[in-house]
Image (tube, grey):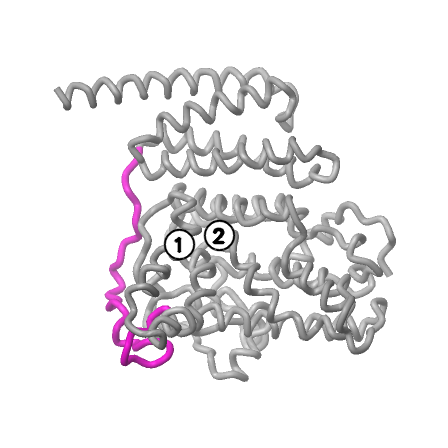
C-alpha cells in the first residue's frame, strides 16, 4: 500500500488520476493526513491540457470556440472555489469524519481493494444523486448554476466551480461514512472531481463502446446544453450507468447550445458566483403564501405556481441554433494585458496552495485578499466597468508592495525586477486613466 509520507505525485500518476486510472495499491492510505491533495497537484496538468486544447482547437476549422474573456472567467471561478480550503478543511470531508467517528456501524479495512472499489462506486453514485438534486432543488441550483453559466464548452469550463456548492454536496456522501474509512473517501471524492475535467471538450467526438459505460465528452455536452432535449439529463460523474438506470440519460443529437436558459451576460466573478442568491431571495419574498415560498426553494429553478415540480419544458426559450454567446468587443492590447496579469496571478495562487502549510496565517490572509482583489479587478476590466481603472491601479500598487516586502516571490527569481517595473508602469497608466475619467465627468457635469 501507499507509504506514510506522500507529498507529490509522479508525472504518470498525475496523468492517470485525471482519468481515474489510479490503482488501489498506490492510492490507499491509513489516515486522512497521508492522502495527497490530488486536486491541487493537478493544477499544472489542467493548464497544460487547456493550452493543448487551445492549440489544437485553433488548428481545426471546426474546433471549439475559445474566447479569452470566458476562459479567464472560468479559471477565476475555479481559483475562487478553492480559496475557502486554505482556511478550513472541506465541509464534505469534515462532516464525513464526524459521522465516521461518532456513528459508524462497521469499519471496512482501509488496505483492501474491495473497500477501494466499493468506495469508487459509492462516491460516484452519491455524486449522481447530488448532481441531480442540484438541478431539481432551487436552493442547491443557486450554487451549481455557476458551473453552467459559460456559453462555451471547453476544458476551462470544467474549472468554473462554485464557492458554495460544498455546503450541500456533503449530505450525499454521509451513508458511506457509516462503514468506509475517511482516508479512502478523501481519495475518491478527489478522483471523481478530477475525472470530470477532461470530458469538458468538443474535440473528442465519440468513444465507441465506452459510451455505454462511462460519462464521456459527448454525454456531458448534452448535460451543459440549454436545448429542450438537454435539460435535466446526464448527471453522471464517471459512470453513465446511473443515468441509464434512473431514466435521466439522453444521447447527443441536435447541435448543443451551451449555457443557462437565461444567460447572465457578465464576466465579473462575484456576479457569476453569487448573483442567483439575491434573485432566489426576491422570488421567495414575492411568492404568495408559505406553500409557494417553500416551493420556490425546494422545487426546480423553472417552477412557477401551477406548473410541475421541475417546471414546464415549454417555458424554456426557443433554440434556433444561431444563438451567439455574450462577447463584447475589447481591444487586443487589453486582452494581452489581462492575460499577462492573470498569468502572474496564477503563479501567486499556485504558490499559495502549494506552500500553505509553511506560510503564516497573516501571509495566507494577505495573499488570499490579493487573489480576490485581482480576480475582481480583472473581471471589471473584462466587463469594462466604469470604476475598473481605479480598482486596477490599487491592485497594481498592492502587488508591488507585497512583492517588495517578500510576500510574493516570482517563479523565476530573475523576473522579479521586470515584473515590478511592469506593475509600476501599469499603476501609472491606470492612475492617468482615473484622472482622465474624472476630468471627463467634471466636464459633463459643467
Left or right of 232? Residue 440 is left
Q: Quadrant of the N terminus?
A: bottom right
30 or 53, which lies in front?
30
The range drawn in magenta is: 301-330
Q: Which residue is tagged 2?
A: 160
* Residue 30 seen in this snapshot: yes
Q: Where in the figure is residue 32, as x and y percent of width and height?
A: 78, 57
**Residue 150, numbered circle:** 1
Within the magenta stretch, is there residue 333?
no
Left or right of 412? Residue 216 is left
Q: Is residue 116 above or below residue 373?
A: below
Q: Where in the figure is residue 135, as x and y percent of width and height?
A: 44, 69
Distance of mark 1 from mark 2, alpha carbons? 8 Å
Residue, far left:
446
174 or 342, which lies in front?
174
Residue at image location 51% in from the left, 69% down from the top: 131
Look at the magenta stretch and give its main secondary structure: loop
Q: Where in the figure is residue 50, as x and y percent of width and height?
A: 52, 47
Within the magenta stretch, is there residue 325?
yes
Q: Where in the figure is residue 204, as x and y percent of width and height?
A: 50, 61
Q: Is residue 184 above or below residue 338?
A: below
Amino acid at each position: 500500500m501507499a507509504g506514510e509520507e506522500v507529498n507529490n505525485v509522479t508525472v504518470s500518476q498525475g496523468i492517470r488520476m485525471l482519468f481515474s486510472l489510479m490503482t488501489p495499491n498506490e492510492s490507499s492510505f491509513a489516515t486522512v493526513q497521508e492522502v495527497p491533495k490530488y486536486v491541487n497537484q493537478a493544477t499544472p496538468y489542467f493548464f497544460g491540457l487547456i493550452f493543448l486544447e487551445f492549440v489544437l482547437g485553433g488548428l481545426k476549422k471546426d474546433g471549439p470556440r475559445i474566447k479569452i474573456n470566458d476562459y479567464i472567467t472560468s479559471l477565476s471561478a475555479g481559483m475562487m472555489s478553492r480559496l475557502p480550503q486554505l482556511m478550513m478543511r472541506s465541509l464534505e470531508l469534515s462532516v464525513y469524519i464526524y459521522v465516521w467517528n461518532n456513528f459508524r456501524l462497521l469499519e471496512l479495512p482501509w488496505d483492501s481493494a474491495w473497500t477501494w472499489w466499493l468506495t469508487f462506486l459509492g462516491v460516484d453514485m452519491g455524486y449522481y444523486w447530488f448532481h441531480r438534486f442540484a438541478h431539481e432543488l432551487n436552493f442547491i441550483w443557486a450554487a451549481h448554476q455557476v458551473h453552467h453559466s459559460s456559453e462555451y464548452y471547453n476544458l476551462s469550463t470544467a474549472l468554473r466551480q462554485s464557492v458554495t456548492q460544498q455546503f450541500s454536496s456533503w449530505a450525499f456522501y454521509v451513508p458511506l461514512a457509516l462503514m468506509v474509512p475517511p482516508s479512502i473517501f478523501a481519495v475518491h471524492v478527489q478522483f471523481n472531481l478530477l475525472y470530470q475535467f477532461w470530458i469538458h471538450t468538443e474535440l473528442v467526438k465519440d468513444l465507441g463502446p465506452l459510451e455505454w459505460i462511462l460519462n464521456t465528452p459527448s454525454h456531458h455536452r448534452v448535460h451543459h446544453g440549454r436545448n429542450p432535449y438537454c435539460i435535466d439529463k446526464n448527471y453522471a460523474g464517471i459512470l453513465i450507468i446511473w443515468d441509464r438506470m434512473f431514466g435521466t440519460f439522453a444521447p447527443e443529437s441536435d447541435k448543443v447550445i451551451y449555457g443557462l436558459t437565461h444567460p447572465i451576460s457578465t464576466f465579473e466573478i462575484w456576479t457569476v458566483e453569487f448573483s442567483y442568491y439575491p434573485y432566489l431571495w426576491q422570488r421567495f419574498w414575492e411568492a404568495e403564501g408559505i406553500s409557494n415560498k417553500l416551493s420556490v426553494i425546494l422545487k426546480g429553478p423553472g417552477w412557477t405556481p401551477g406548473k410541475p415540480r421541475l417546471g414546464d419544458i415549454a417555458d424554456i426559450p426557443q433554440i434556433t441554433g444561431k444563438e451567439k454567446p455574450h462577447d463584447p468587443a475589447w481591444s487586443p492590447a487589453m486582452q494581452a494585458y489581462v492575460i499577462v496579469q492573470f498569468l502572474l496571478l496564477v503563479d501567486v495562487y499556485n504558490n499559495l496552495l502549494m506552500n500553505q502549510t509553511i506560510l503564516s496565517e497573516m501571509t495566507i490572509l494577505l495573499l488570499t485578499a490579493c487573489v480576490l482583489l485581482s480576480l475582481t479587478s480583472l473581471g471589471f476590466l473584462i466587463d469594462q466597468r466604469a470604476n475598473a481603472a481605479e480598482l486596477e491601479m490599487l491592485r497594481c500598487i498592492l502587488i508591488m508592495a507585497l512583492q517588495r516586502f517578500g510576500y510574493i516571490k516570482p517563479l523565476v527569481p530573475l523576473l522579479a525586477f521586470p515584473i515590478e517595473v511592469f506593475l509600476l508602469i501599469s499603476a501609472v497608466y491606470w492612475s492617468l486613466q482615473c484622472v482622465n475619467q474624472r476630468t471627463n465627468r467634471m466636464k459633463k457635469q459643467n
